[in-house]
Image (tube, helix red, strand yellow):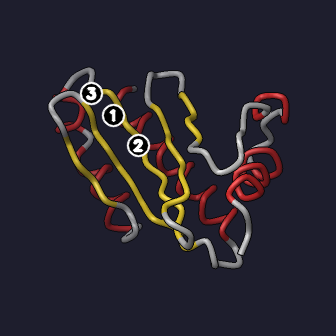
Amino acid sequence: MKKFRAIISKTLIDELGLDAVMLSRLDGDKPVCIELRDGAEIYITAEENDVLMAFIEIPIKDKRKIQMQSNKIMDIFINDEDLLMNVRKDKFVVMCYIDKKSKDIESKLLDKLVVFNNLAELINS
């Protein structure tokens, strides 16, 4: 089973092409936070020993936007049964769990990060 830091580094540096300097603050197995331009924040943490938990908190700027984009938003959830959703007063929260024993964990994490980013764009574009 891969270490949390190795999974995060490989996904963000090798797969997404981020500069390694941006990840200099990675500290062992402590949670990682990635802030997106629109104020949304993605969190990745190692839950217990066998699971990664990734979630995004998207600030809701205009609730009407969620209603207008509801078909596209629901399509994302229908196509990815691993995603869980919670809508709060001022935040749209999406989360998922990824098995750390999975051989292609970096690819799965990358897919979830892309989905999170797409949802943030849909909700706040």
Label located before the other in sequence (2 or 3) = 3
Q: Quadrant of residue 96?
A: bottom left
| Nearer mark to the viewer, of 3 and 1 | 3
C-beta proximity under 8 Å, tags 3 and 1: yes
Q: Residue 80: percent from the left, percent from the top? A: 41, 67
Q: Which residue is mark 3?
A: 60
* Closer to the camera in the image, 96 or 52: 52
- Mark 2 or 3: the one toward you: 3
Q: CA distance from mark 2 to mark 3?
A: 12 Å
Query: Tag 2's secondary structure?
Result: helix
Neighbours of disc 1 within 10 Å: few (<14), some (14-19), many (20+):
many
Residue 85 tag number: none
Compute the Cα span from label 2 to label 1: 6 Å
Query: Disc 1 residue type?
Result: Ile
Note whether 45 is above or below 99 in the view shown.
above
Percent from the top left, x then y, of residue 7? 72, 58
Q: Which mark is residue 119?
A: 2
Instruction: Give the side of residue 51 with respect to residue 17, left or right.
Output: left
* In-image side of 101 versus 12 (left or right): left
Q: Nearer the viewer, residue 1 or 62?
A: 1
Indicate the secondary structure of the residue bearing disc 3: loop
Circles 2 and 3, Cβ within 8 Å, touching? The answer is no
Residue type at mark 2 is Leu
The circle drawn on residue 123 is 1
* Secondary structure under the numbered disc 1 in the rendered image: helix
Crowd around label 2: few <14 · some 14–19 · many ≥20 (10 Å): many
Instruction: Tell me which residue sits at (58%, 58%) in the image.
Output: 111
Looking at the image, which residue is at 70% across and 51% down?
8
Q: Work out which quarter of the rendered image holds the C terminus and state it.
A: top left
**Mark pair 3, 1: CA separation:** 7 Å
Residue at x-position 50% and y-position 65%: 48
